[in-house]
Amino acid sequence: MKLLLVGSPNSGKTTLFNRLTGIGAKTVNYPGSTVDLLVGRWREHTVIDSPGIYSLEPRSLDEEVTLNAITSEKPDVILLVVDATQLERQLVLALQLIRSGHPVAILVSMLDLLKGEGFQLSLDRLRLELGAPCLAVSTGVDVESGAIDVVEFEKVLQRTAEKTAPRAEVGSGSSTTLIDEWGRAAEIKKNVLQPLAESRLQKGSTVLSARNRTRAIDRVVLHPFLGPVLFLLTMGGLFASIYWVASPLMEFVDSGFGALNGWVLSFAPESLFVRFLSEGVLAGAGAVFVFVPQIFILFMGVIALEDSGYLARAASIVDRPLRLLGLGGRSFVPLLSGFACAVPAMLASRTINSRRERFLTLFILPLMSCSARLPVYALLIGFLFPTSSGLAGLTLALLYFGSIVAGAVAALLAGRLGLFKGERAFLLLELPVYRVPKLQVVFKQALLRTQSYVRRAGLVILGLSVVIWVGTTFPDYQNPDQGERLERSYLGRTGTLLSPIFEPMGGDWRTGVGLLSAFAAREVFVSTMAVLFHVTDAEEEGMRAGLLEQMRVAKTDSGQTLFTVSSVVGLLIFFVVALQCLSTFSVAGKESGSWRFAWMQLISFNIIAYILAVAAVQGLRYLGFS
């Protein structure tokens, strides 16, 4: 049986999906779009989690995906999750689905929060009012341990799936019908909600209700002065922790790949096939996968902030400064998502109603320092500060701050030049009650997103690593002199032709090849460096340490040190600004509906990145930093 989970944002829908499907869920691209749906199994049923939606009359592109899923997926049962504390507004969606003739079962969540506010809900009365099955659900415990009455749930699914009412077209109906449904929803709420008895209230009188706690916290979080300070501390702590917390895990992964590489190489060091496995496959993959812990921690931080209810407050805090740039509070979530990956961030911009703000958000999103930049940042920062994790963490935070500044400048210039036309929208956001994020849910969501990242990037990285190894090994693969072999290789000859372009940045043909390979995926730069320098490293320090050591002793053809403070700073600046992601380029063209828009991003950002990097390198050299 196919079950489609539908509900408003923050209704508990995705949390329930996680409880139902356990660890077996996966992301699946929705046909005809670039949106990922979550798909998993519960018992013999297929469960699909769709994007949040407020009604069957979509106001954003993201909501259209859910409406299309309702129609084209033809689910046996639509499970509508309704937040009991937001009953009136969310019942409108229930009435629309029922009127459309779809097999709907209502799952009521947040009943514990409703009780904390002094009310209880009669499920029996709600069933009568709606004419649809209604069940209470808890998203705080495992399904099999009490989140749902499993036996009753199975009966409800069977009864709902057997409904034979004809399905009307989703979204059909006049505005008068919608107004009537709002009135009907208000009437139902009045009939099904009852105040708790005084004796039951007294039992919990020493505990503030969820809404009272939220109001108390918001006095600080939304304070005109304390709110922005707390926001900066929260964001700064998130990005600094990416470096500090991940360090032990990175060292473990790094050492593991180094040991595996050394073990493979020990079989036959002179064998071309063994060298291919060691230098082409393991070196390339290991140099990138060592940074997966950082990416996982970034995802965990963003998801925890979202589940806690803080992200909505953050959007309201930054609404005013964003408006100075021509953006708005609704741009905040896509921009924050951009620190994980620009592709889903561009999809998240579908919730922005204003065409002007949406295009401006799409335009500056590639400037946000995505997780693909993390491996590059970590490698280059490790070169600059090999022994100081404090300075390394501060530098990483500054790079993220620099990407925000770059985005702000780009937004201002685009606004002043009038690149994007359209009306500006006012910010209307629902501020959910504060909740303590469930560690298991946060962990699972972060794991799913990290797995999606690894699947998406893994084949690209592996393929390019093999291509680069072939390019640096042949045709003179039997030459024992590594320097001569590199110089005479296919890639070496190509890089020599391009080296005049990269020399002003303090690089040579090797850094040039690395930057060019990064257009497939930024993190490929690291694996390219590992392959170019033939890092196999069987020592205890691991592959990353081996690559850093090779970078410190690398020389140009003229005998000068290749990687210096100035050249590494130039590379960092280039990676902050440059658009080096073909996936982002492709999605930008699709989401904007204009390939001219995507080409404008690609060309302008990379030219500006090159100019800034050259200026930084030459300026530092003039000041005496080699």
Image (cartoon, helix red, strand yellow):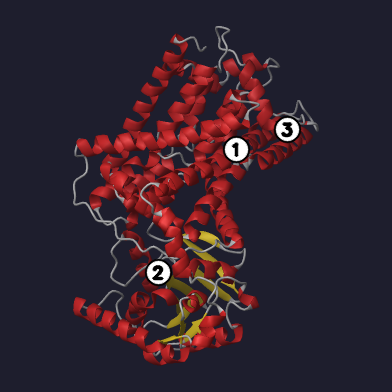
**Which numbered dot is residue 231?**
none
Q: Which residue is mark 1?
A: 288
Marks 2 and 1, Cα distance to the nearest angstrom? 37 Å
Q: Give the x, y percent position of residue 218.
A: 42, 58
Q: How many neighbours does mark 1 have within 10 angstroms: few (below 14), some (14-19), or many (20 or more)?
A: many
Q: Give the x, y percent position of residue 302.
A: 50, 51
Q: Secondary structure at mark 3?
A: helix
Q: Give the x, y percent position of residue 53.
A: 37, 68
Mark 1 and mark 3 in contact? Answer it, CB < 8 Å: no
Q: Earlier in the sequence, mark 2 or mark 1?
A: 2
Q: Give the x, y percent position of residue 210.
A: 48, 69
Q: Which residue is mark 2?
A: 8
Q: Earlier in the sequence, mark 2 or mark 3?
A: 2
Q: How many neighbours does mark 3 have within 10 angstroms: few (below 14), some (14-19), or many (20 or more)?
A: some
Q: Amino acid at mark 3?
A: Val
Marks 1 and 3, Cα distance to the nearest angstrom? 20 Å
